[in-house]
Amino acid sequence: MAQLMIFLIAFSLLAFAPLCFCGKSSSGYLYPQFYDHSCPKAQEIVKCIVAKAVAKETRMAASLLRLHFHDCFVKGCDASILLDNSGSIISEKRSNPNRNSARGFEVIDEIKSALEKECPQTVSCADILALAARDSTVLTGGPSWEVPLGRRDSKGASLSGSNNDIPAPNNTFQTILTKFKLQGLDIVDLVALSGSHTIGNARCTSFRQRLYNQSGNGQPDNTLDQSYAAQLRIGCPRSGGDQNLFFLDFVSPTKFDNSYFKNILASKGLLNSDQVLSTKNEASMELVKKYAENNDLFFQQFAKSMVKMGNISPLTGNRGEIRRNCRRIN
């Protein structure tokens, strides 16, 4: 009995122990209090502008969250995605994953402008992306977390990295998992972070093959619920309508919750990359089931995985710079 009590006490202490939010990079630590003295109003300013943007257009929450993903998967979380074309830079905005779909740049510009007035050349664009992603999640009803800060901005971009490293909607499960593993993320992170598709939209062009020609044999994807597929075909014809938008989670498209996972179990995941989580791998299917059953568990893991993703290869110390304008190097 005594041993059981000791175990239960130890377990409860572990369960309620605060998560360590410090992430070590190659030349320093990221930590939530990074701007407490140099720019104490930084987080408040970011939150205020994000809240205004999301109130104006709910979809913006998903767009800002996606910017952080697409930044971190290319060269690490260094705001390379924000750079426009210039003499020495070929912008990542022109890559296949970003062209005609990455958005929210004007919101980041507005945040940067306000921060430059408050505390010039102090808060990095990379940190703005990380904070905006967290605030967007919270504003749509999702979990909150302390964002480790102290990233610096890159002086370059990688169009090829953006084309090759960001998981694509039509990638196989194994390809997606490999792309996550290359970033130091595992299968738990993959499933939890895919849950961000509980908000936002996808274009017809990103799932059309599932409706008409999944395997190159002129047949639709047999893992897609047929009545759902029939609804999708109305707005996503065989040709044309490439940019037509569809909710990634048709049940509660503007609310951050676990209905995304319930949809997958009902064979109503919109993208191929959503549905393969339950059809191609047993471990990922078990995670989908767990998150579909337990919203709190999904929220806890999503927060942990976002912190982990936000710590992919950050520039710290004297590496990189603090851009004055997020669209160009100083």
Image: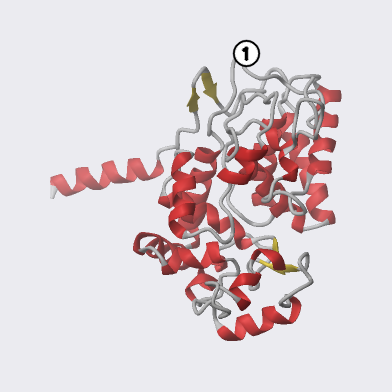
Examine the image and state in which quarter residue 324 appears: top right
Q: Residue at x 68, y 45 (%)?
A: 67
**Residue 46, relative to residue 51: is it above or below?**
above
Say whether residue 325 is left or right of residue 61.
right
Q: Please report the residue visible at 62 percent of the width from the left and 23 percent of the height from the top.
A: 34
**In what quadrant of the picture does the C terminus appear?**
top right
The residue shown at (69%, 54%) is 62
Nearest to the observer: residue 181 or residue 240: 240
Depth check: 42 or 182 in front?
Answer: 182
Give percent across and percent down for residue 254: 70, 63
Question: In which quarter of the view is residue 158 placed?
Answer: top right
Could you tell me residue 242's position as x and y percent? 76, 67
Which structural element holds mark 1? loop
Residue shown at the point (49%, 20%) measured from the top left: 26
Residue 101: x and y, percent? 74, 54
Q: Note whether 94 is above or below 207 in the view shown.
A: above
Q: Is residue 42 above or below residue 222?
A: above
Q: Hey, what amino acid is under mark 1?
A: Asn
Farthest front residue?
Answer: 217
Q: Is residue 199 above or below residue 68?
A: below
Q: Nearer the viewer, residue 109 or 89?
A: 89
Q: Nearer the viewer, residue 146 or 327?
A: 327
Q: Image quadrant of residue 306?
A: top right
Query: In this figure, which residue is indicated by the disc labeled 1?
Result: 318
Q: Residue furthest top?
A: 318
